[in-house]
Amino acid sequence: MISAEEIEKLLESVKKGEVAVEEAARRLSAHGQTNLGFARVDLGRLSRCGIPEVVFAEGKSADQVAEISRKIIENNHDLLVTRLDATDYEVIVKTIPKLQYNPRARAGYLRRSDKPLKPGILVVSAGTSDVPVAEEAAVTCEVLGYQPARLFDAGVAGIHRLLAESRQLAGASVIIVAAGMEGALPSVVGGLVAAPVIAVPTSVGYGASFGGIAALLAMLNSCASGVTVVNIDNGFGAAVAAIRIMQSATSSTAASTSGDQ
C-alpha cells in the first residue's frame, strides 16, 4: 500500500515532466500484486509490512522461482529465496546472474539497497549441527537490512562457552537462539539478558527428539519469562520476528522524539 505522501510526490514528478505517465503507472501498479498465473507476487508487502515478498523455493520448480524472483527484482525490491537447493540455484542464476547463494542457509539473495546494515541482532546456535538454521536467520537479517552478530556452537553441554560471551549477549537488542536436542539453550539465554529472546527449535537430535518436537515443547515450557518460540527449523521466521521488533522500537523512538519537539 503506497502512502498518500508518496503518491503526491510521484504526481508532482509527472506534472514537472520528471517522470513519464507510463512509468508512474508502473510504479503505482507495483504496489499491488502481479499475477504470473502460477503465483500472485505481492509487490505491496514492503510498503505495507516493512518487509518485501520473500520466495519459499521448496515445492516450486526452478523456472517458477526464477520468474517470481525476476518480477521482484524488476520492481527494485531486495530478493531473498529460502530453502533453495544448490541444483536449482545453478538453474536460476542463469536468469539472475547477480544472485548470490549461501549453501549452509540454503538461501539465494540479491540485496539492491545501498543503505548500511543496522546492528542489534545476535544469532546464537547451540551446536554446529544447528548452524544451518541459525545461518538462515542470519542471512535473512542481512538481506532485510540488519547486520547480525553470530555466536555459534555455544550450547549448554559446554556452558562456559556461552558465559564467556556475556558481554556480547548483554549488548544485543534482540537474540535469536537455535537449538536442537533438549532445546535448553533459549531458557539459559533468557535468564541472562533483558533483550527479547526468539527461540528456534531445530530437528537435530536422536530418536526421542522426534524431529525437533522435544526441543519445541521444551522451549514452549521455558522457565525464563517471555521467550518467544517459532516453528521447528524456522530460522527465517525468527529473523522476521526480530526485524519487526527492531523496526517497532525504531518507530517508537522516532515518534517519541517527534512528540518532544
Image (cartoon, grey):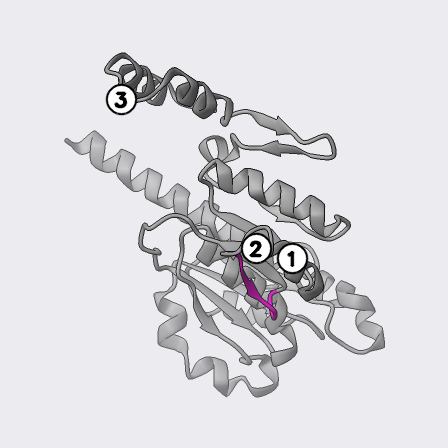
Assess whether mark 1 and mark 2 are in contact (beta carbons under 8 angstroms). Answer: yes
Q: Which residues are magenta?
A: 99-105
| Mark with earlier residue (3, 1) | 3
Q: Quadrant of the C terminus?
A: top left
Left or right: 155 with respect to 10?
A: right
For the residue pair 190 and 65, the one nearer the viewer reads as 65
For the residue pair 83 and 93, the one nearer the viewer reads as 93
Distance between the alpha carbons at the discs numbered 3 and 2: 41 Å
Q: Residue at x 59, y 60 (%)?
A: 107
For the residue pair 133 and 125, the one nearer the viewer reads as 133
Give coordinates of residue 69: x percent, y percent. 59, 45
Mark 1 closeness class: few <14, some 14–19, many ≥20 residues within 10 Å: some
Residue 71 visible to the viewer: yes
Identity, as a three-letter code, of the amino acid under mark 2: Ala
For the residue pair 15 and 252, the one nearer the viewer reads as 15
Residue labelled with disc 3: 18
Residue 64 occupies quadrant: top right
Residue labelled with disc 1: 234
Distance between the alpha carbons at the discs numbered 3 and 1: 44 Å
Identity, as a three-letter code, of the amino acid under mark 3: Glu
Q: Residue at x 70, y 47 (%)?
A: 63
In the displayed structure, 84 sits above or below 170; it is: above
Mark 2 closeness class: few <14, some 14–19, many ≥20 residues within 10 Å: many
Residue labelled with disc 2: 238
Q: Residue at x 35, y 75 (%)?
A: 167
Q: Secondary structure at mark 3?
A: loop
Give coordinates of residue 109: x percent, y percent. 53, 55
